[in-house]
């Protein structure tokens, strides 16, 4: 099976707004251990999330790009994706920083361009706040500048948001033709941007059929540009010995939700999908329970036994998903267990299917 696996780094702390104890930590020492453990157990990527201030209140957390650079020096194989906010970074600076990290990591660096929904974060740093679709237009220019600086000996660009004048990078990236470019967002503007510019499209949690529909739409749009992006989906994993235990854990997490944090988050995301003309996109149709895991990870439904989860992953692969982005409640125990039990099962299912197809 070609499907790959990623996990959310814990530089922002735990992944659910719940009073249930989360055996995880935000520190670099912990994240270094996670990355080393993950790469030894078959994970292909880690995604380092970006926040300058937290959306639900004050708390310790690590910045994305500098954390990614540090992880590059203590890992050997796993690919490192750093989330970047246009508007809070300049693409020329990210191109240079990115090529540097790419050299440190020997070609393992990637970026996740997140167009931004947290208005207070931009206000706190004195940056202008743009309407939803304008944020995606800025992100599209941001990606064009990255690609130009990473691939051309000399590059100029004149857009509505960025101007580049006969600029160059030395050295350019090791990754060819350039570091992988991911993006988030589920709105119409996000889908159009993915079709035209990004290498990978990150989807919020969704059902198999919901993911399939979204993928087919973007592939149809991308065809007009002669492109074929890849697709990743967010998933919160609860693997237990029985399906009953896994579902009980999910109910326990939601029943003990941190109501203040969920409410604060819900108030901030009004600038996301629900603000668009089409009323679709990030969290536009997410109820309270789904906001307990901020990227709709519960909707993907990787909740059950290891065998059930492996079969569900196969269904997402058949729908066109290329990468599963995993989050866990107790990272210390559950990430290694996923690597030891679920990833091998997924590979085994694929091998069995290949043998059946060859026999037919």
Image (cartoon, rainbow, N blue to C red):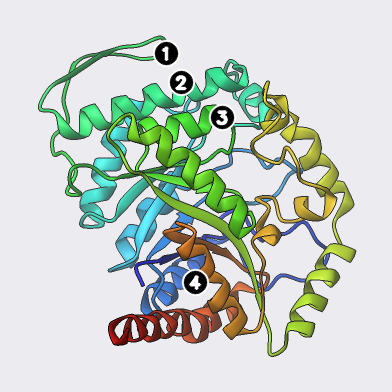
Residue corresponding to mark 3: 188
- N-terminal label among 1 and 2: 2
- Under circle 3, the secondary element is helix
- In the orientation shown, which residue stands out farthest toward the bottom? 241
Instruction: Identify the residue at image location x=89%, y=65%.
Output: 255
User: Dot 2: what SS?
Assistant: helix
Q: Residue at x 55, y 83 (%)?
A: 337
Whole-number angstrom distance, CA of label 3 to CA of label 1 = 21 Å
Task: Evaluate if marks 4 and 1 touch, with contact meaning CB atoms under 8 Å apart.
Answer: no
Marked residue nearer the N-terminal end (4 or 1): 1
Vertical relation: 217 (above or below) 163: below
Earlier sequence position, callout 3 versus callout 4: 3
Q: Which mark is residue 314?
A: 4
**Crowding at mark 2 (Cα within 10 Å: few <14, some 14-19, many 20+):** some
- Marks 1 and 2 in Cβ contact (< 8 Å): yes
Distance between the alpha carbons at the discs numbered 2 and 3: 15 Å
Q: Which mark is residue 161?
A: 1
Which is nearer the N-term, disc 2 or disc 4?
A: 2
């Amino acid at each position: 099976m070609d499907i790959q696996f990623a996990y959310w780094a814990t530089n922002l702390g735990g992944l659910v707004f719940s009073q249930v104890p989360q055996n995880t930590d935000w520190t670099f020492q912990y994240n270094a251990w996670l990355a080393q453990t993950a790469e030894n157990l078959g994970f292909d990527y880690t995604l380092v999330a970006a926040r300058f201030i937290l959306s639900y209140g004050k708390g310790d957390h690590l910045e994305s790009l500098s954390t990614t650079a540090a992880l590059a020096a203590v890992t050997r194989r796993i690919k490192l994706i750093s989330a970047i906010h246009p508007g809070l970074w300049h693409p020329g600076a990210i191109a240079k920083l990115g090529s540097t990290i790419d050299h440190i990591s020997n070609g393992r660096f990637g970026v996740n361009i997140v167009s931004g929904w947290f208005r207070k974060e931009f206000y706190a740093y004195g940056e202008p706040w743009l309407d939803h679709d304008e944020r995606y237009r800025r992100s599209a220019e941001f990606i064009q500048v990255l690609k130009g600086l990473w691939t051309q000996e000399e590059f100029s660009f004149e857009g509505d948001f960025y101007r580049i004048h006969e600029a160059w990078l030395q050295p350019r990236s090791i990754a060819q033709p350039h570091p992988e470019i991911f993006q988030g967002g589920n709105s119409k503007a996000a889908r159009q941007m993915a079709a035209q510019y990004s290498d990978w499209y990150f989807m919020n949690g969704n059902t198999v059929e919901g993911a399939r529909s979204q993928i087919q739409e973007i592939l149809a749009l991308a065809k007009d540009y002669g492109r074929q992006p890849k697709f990743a989906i967010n998933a919160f994993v609860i693997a237990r010995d029985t399906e009953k235990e896994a579902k009980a854990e999910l109910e326990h997490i939601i029943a003990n939700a941190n109501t203040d944090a969920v409410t604060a988050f819900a108030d901030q995301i009004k600038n996301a999908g629900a603000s668009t003309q089409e009323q679709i996109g990030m969290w536009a149709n997410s109820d309270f329970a789904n906001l307990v895991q901020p990227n709709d990870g519960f909707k993907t439904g990787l909740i059950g036994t290891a065998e059930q989860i492996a079969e569900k992953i196969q269904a997402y692969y058949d729908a066109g998903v290329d990468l599963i982005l995993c989050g866990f409640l107790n990272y210390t125990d559950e990430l290694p267990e996923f690597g030891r039990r679920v990833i091998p099962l997924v590979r085994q299912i694929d091998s069995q299917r290949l043998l059946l197809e060859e026999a037919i």
